[in-house]
Amino acid sequence: MRLTIQEARESDLDIVRNLVSFYVYDLSEVMGWECPETGLFVGCDDLAQYWGRDPANRLARWPHGWRGHAFVIRIDARLAGFALVRRVEDGDPPTHEIGEFFVLRRFRRLGVGGHVAREMFDRFTGNWEVRELIGNHPAQVFWRRVISEYTGGRYEESVERTRHGNWEMATQRFSNVDRSEGG
């Protein structure tokens, strides 16, 4: 099994947008969301911003320093998912968060998600925030395990509302600054 994590190209925006429907569909199972009358699950209103697009000037709603990074996950050259990372604070060190993270079901439980998460953490040194919807227990279990293994158990967790108050989230915070400096 050959796993590749590619920084997304312009042409990948539509691919990730299509995968988002499966991502939101998967979330609907654990969150109890009904199928829309259109028959199509949609979400990630700010998806194009990870590609530097901001046609409606919505970036103003994000904290200063927001910058998105999109990645496409492939296994043996086959599409397997995506990871969206954003820098939410420019400080020294900067703060990053996992915006969205999705691995197709056929590739789950093979270590793919953990490998991709660790690669994202290693790629972006600084403080980290990872959030899961409070009702999404499988995601909470996954992220707690991955972050605990990555940090040797050195992380904090709290329950809080999103920046815009829409959702209650389990939030894990940690820093990998010492890790990147060999500490």
Image (cartoon, rainbow, N blue to C red):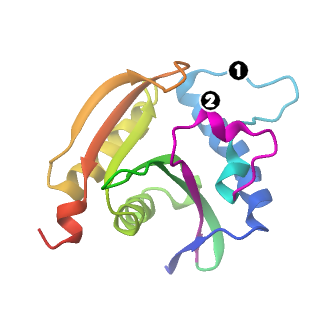
**Residue position marked by numbered label 2 in the rendering:** 28
Secondary structure, mark 2, is helix
**Residue located 59% across and 21% down the image:** 32
Residue at left offset 36%, top offset 29%: 170
Position in image of residue 158 (x %, y %):
28, 27
Circle 1: residue type:
Glu
Q: Residue at x 68, y 50 (%)?
A: 49
User: Distance from label 2 to label 1 (Cα)?
Assistant: 7 Å
Q: Is residue 53 left or right of residue 152?
A: right
Residue 55 lies in magenta, yes or no? yes
Q: Which residue is mark 1?
A: 34
Disc 2 and disc 1 in contact, CB within 8 angstroms: yes
Q: Is residue 81 left or right of residue 17?
A: left
Q: Locate residue 17, reporting x and y percent.
A: 75, 51
Q: Is residue 111 above or below residue 64?
A: below
Whichever of callouts 2 and 1 sits on the residue coming sooner in the sequence is 2
Question: In the displayed structure, would residue 83 be above or below residue 163?
Answer: below
Segment colored magenta: 52-75
Q: Nearer the viewer, residue 153 or 128?
A: 128
